[in-house]
Image (cartoon, grey):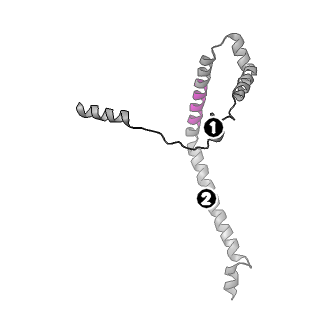
Amino acid sequence: MAAQADVSAGLETENFAVPERNLNLGELDFTSDDFWLDEVDVHIQENLEDDIVKEALNKGVDLRQYSKEIEQDLLKVENESVQDYIKESQNIASLHKQIAACDTILEVGWFFLWCYNPMSELHVLGKG
């Protein structure tokens, strides 16, 4: 108990100054004179002029609840989309193999064209 009191007493007397850092946050620096809340007002006004938002406000819809419902709908659509990708995974893998085979054929074809080109180094060396 005495050791703990000594430690806490030492903490009270020490100066734990945080060194000042010169970070350039650019547009993220909301403490600078360049940060204006006018942009926020513009976005709020744009949202208030949106037809869907106007309709929801006129009907007295709780926008928080509405946004949660939209978020749930988006999550459902996202999950369905992932399921579609999973269903198509075999087709995607097959397509990948076909593309890789075509690439190989094209590489071999270009190699033979290069080898048998009368101006290629191999052709000139073979005649020499």
Quarter of the figure that contains the N terminus: top left
Q: Secondary structure at mark 2?
A: helix
Specify the quadrant of the image occupied by residue 111: bottom right
**Magenta stretch: dominant SS?**
helix
Residue 14, compared with residue 50, is above or below; it is below
- The part of the chain drawn in magenta is 72-84
Question: Disc 2 residue type?
Answer: Ala
Q: Which mark is residue 28?
A: 1
Residue plotted at (74% across, 26% down)? 42
Observer-nearest of 32 and 123 = 32
Count up the numbered dots. 2
Residue that badge 2 annotates: 101
Residue 126, compared with residue 100, is above or below; it is below
* Image location (x, y in percent) of residue 11: 36, 35
Observer-nearest of 34 and 5 = 5
Specify the quadrant of the image occupied by residue 73: top right
Q: Secondary structure at mark 1?
A: helix
Question: Disc 1 residue type?
Answer: Leu
In contact (CB < 8 Å): disc 1 and disc 2? no
Residue 81 is inside the magenta segment: yes
Observer-nearest of 114 and 73 = 73
